[in-house]
Image (tube, rainbow, N blue to C red):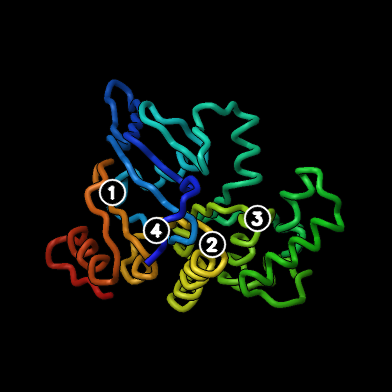
Amino acid sequence: MTTQPTSPPALALAGVHRRFRDGPDEIVALHDVTCTVHHSEMVALTGPSGSGKSTLLHLAAGMDRPDGGTVTVEGTDLATLDATGLAALRRHHVGVVFQRLNLVTTLTAEENVALPLELDGVSAGEATTAARQALRRVGLTPPFDRYPDALSGGQQQRVAIARSLVGQRRLLLADEPTGALDTASSEAVFGLLADLAADDGCAVVVVTHEPRLAAHAERILRLRDGVLTEQGGGAARAVSSAETDAPHGTEVRS
């Protein structure tokens, strides 16, 4: 079990609401969502398509703002930050990994990882050193001068994770990071995320619709129709959630 720290949690949502307009209709993406994620903890966020999972991650990263409630990252209320402050938060505290990796195809693996640091004014030499450390941290081995199209899907995802962590970010948000990967690569990536939480002290929130992957997490948070309906952990709970989502008569395998 994770020992709850005395410092502020990595991420806290309190009474968060988010609504969108679709013509004359109002769509409730999140309704009164409250949850806390601490450092050294990996949390899986599950639920049916359209339940608000990606919206929650966008709010946590400061890429969107709630209509009500508060979103706090390491003790800072994101509502107090302007666009410049939110950009700085993402550069220094929050890493984001999407299913679409957005690697720059004309840059090598180490150049992709070093890029955020260089854009933040770090010297090229220091950025390269940090990039190589981050790539080793996620289990990649030299040479690091390979371009994305020379890497496997799993290796590309590790580069994307390294880029999200470089600069010692302590909160990692991943939105379906293994959607394009095969089973073995998916398991490896989720194992890596769990290790980053357990061994490196990162707080990890990962969206997934696959119960076997959610089972890697210490806790499983479940969204349905924008409402946080379940908080639990363990493989059995994850499989139970998937069975609830599955169409009638569909067999769910862990």
Q: Quadrant of residue 201?
A: bottom right
For marks 4 and 2, give the CA distance. 13 Å
Q: Amino acid at mark 1?
A: Leu
Query: Which type of secondary structure does the marked residue at label 3 adopt?
Result: loop
Mark 3, Cα crowd under 10 Å, few <14 / some 14-19 / many 20+, is some
Q: Earlier in the sequence, mark 1 or mark 3?
A: 3
Q: Is residue 125 left or right of residue 201?
A: right
Mark 1, Cα crowd under 10 Å, few <14 / some 14-19 / many 20+, is many
Residue 160, given in percent of the width and then of the height, sits at: 61, 60
Which residue is at a point 23% across and 66% down the rendered structure image? 237
Query: Which type of secondary structure does the marked residue at label 4 adopt?
Result: strand
- Look at the numbered discs 4 and 3 and tell me whether their residues touch, using CB distance below 8 Å: no
Of 220 and 201, nearer the camera is 201
Of 135 and 247, nearer the camera is 135
Of 170 and 229, nearer the camera is 170
Which residue is at a point 87% across and 58% down the rendered structure image? 125
Q: Earlier in the sequence, mark 2 or mark 1?
A: 2
Query: Mark 3 sits on what residue?
Result: 168
For marks 2 and 3, give the CA distance. 11 Å
Q: Earlier in the sequence, mark 2 or mark 3?
A: 3
Label number found at residue 223: 1
Q: Residue furthest left?
A: 248
Label number found at residue 84: none
* Mark count: 4
Residue 102, given in percent of the width and then of the height, sits at: 61, 53
Query: Mark 2 sits on what residue?
Result: 201
Q: Quadrant of the C terminus?
A: bottom left
Label number found at residue 43: 4
For marks 4 and 1, give the CA distance. 13 Å
Q: Is residue 131 left or right of residue 248?
A: right
Q: Residue furthest top?
A: 24
